[in-house]
Image (cartoon, grey):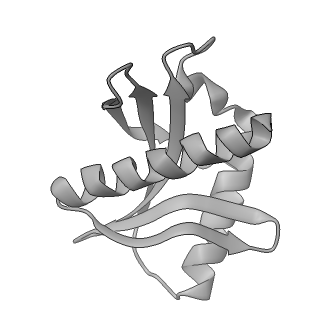
Amino acid sequence: RMAKKKTEIGRAGEAVARKYLEHHGYRVLHINWRHGHYELDIVARLPDLLVVVEVKTRDQRRIMEPEDAVDKAKIRRTVAAADAYVQTFDIDLPVQFDILSLIKRSDGTYHVEHIEDAFYAPVQ
């Protein structure tokens, strides 16, 4: 039951994130793109940049800030998934990793924080 609620909160957050990005001039290419066991929340384009967006949604009763949920292991998985994405679609653009932190307010609206260049691909 908890997992279902978490999924619903996440899906609602991704819809808000998509609207937010489109409103700010991003072209959303994929939501929940999967490749093997990897997944990217949102992949979007700016004219000269591919932007991989990790969406973190919480309700107000959060214990930690949404962006704190993106740890080293999550970064490694996201970077590996982005690499697979770039190869799959033969994209020759720099990749930027952003975090969209969404906190649901009691009135049902969201506080959105867009952290651009939130993390970098670790050096191998």
**Residue under the point 53% across and 47% down:** 54
> Is residue 3 visible in the rendered structure shown here?
yes
Residue at the spot 56% in from the left edge and 40% down from the top edge = 9
Would you say 56 lies left or right of 116 here?
right
Residue 31 locus on image (x, y percent): 50, 66
Percent position of residue 19, x then y: 28, 55
- Left or right relative to 81: residue 111: left
- Please tell me whether residue 107 is drawn above or below residue 92 in the rendered image: above
Q: Nearer the viewer, residue 20 or 76?
A: 20
Q: State the residue at coordinates (46%, 44%).
A: 13
Q: Quadrant of residue 80?
A: bottom right
Depicted 112 relative to depicted 4: above or below = above
Residue 71 image position (x, y, % from top left): 70, 31
Q: Quadrant of residue 50?
A: bottom left
The correct choice, above or below, for 104 with respect to 119 in the image is above
Can you say whether 23 is above or below 3 in the image?
below
In this image, 27 relative to 95: left or right?
A: left
Front residue of 4 and 49:
4
- State the residue in front, 56 or 110: 110
Q: State which quadrant residue 108 falls in.
A: top left
